[in-house]
Amino acid sequence: MLESVELLTMPSLQYQREQGRDMLECRSCGATFPEGQATNDGWHYECPQCNEANGIGQGLRRI
């Protein structure tokens, strides 16, 4: 039998995405924000403030 598994609702998934797991800093504009705000797919990252810095390690850095 399957054990009970907590199902995530859409609002909780949205909250997790907005919060992210790490804080990032934009190397272009200096903005800081949760990782989840910089990506829609968890693969490509872009600064949500200036939209110029791309990629963790290149334009964005973990703080």
Image (spheres, grey):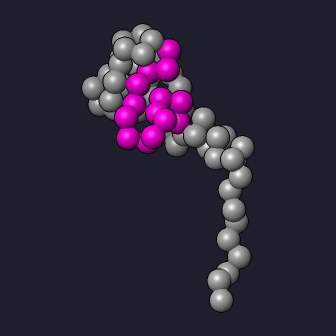
Quadrant of residue 58 within the rendered picture: top left
Query: Where is residue 26 drawn, in percent x and y?
Result: 41, 19
Q: Is residue 46 above or below residue 50?
A: below
17 on left or right of 8: left
21 on left or right of 3: left
Q: Does the magenta run of residues contain 36? A: yes
Quadrant of residue 57 within the rendered picture: top left
Residue 5 appears in view: yes
Main SS category, magenta section = loop
Name the residue: 50% across, 15% down. Answer: 49
Of the 4 image quadrants, the one containing the C terminus is top left
Q: Is residue 30 above or below residue 14?
A: above
Query: Where is residue 17 drawn, in percent x and y?
Result: 58, 40
Name the residue: 53% across, 36% down. Answer: 36
Query: Where is residue 4 drawn, in percent x and y?
Result: 71, 76
Name the residue: 68% across, 56% down. Answer: 8
Viewer-nearest residue: 34 or 15: 15
Of the 4 image quadrants, the one containing the N terminus is bottom right
Residue 30 appears in view: no
Q: Residue furthest left?
A: 58
Query: Where is residue 54 drawn, in percent x and y?
Result: 34, 24
61 on left or right of 1: left
Magenta residues?
Answer: 35-49
Name the residue: 37% across, 14% down. Answer: 52
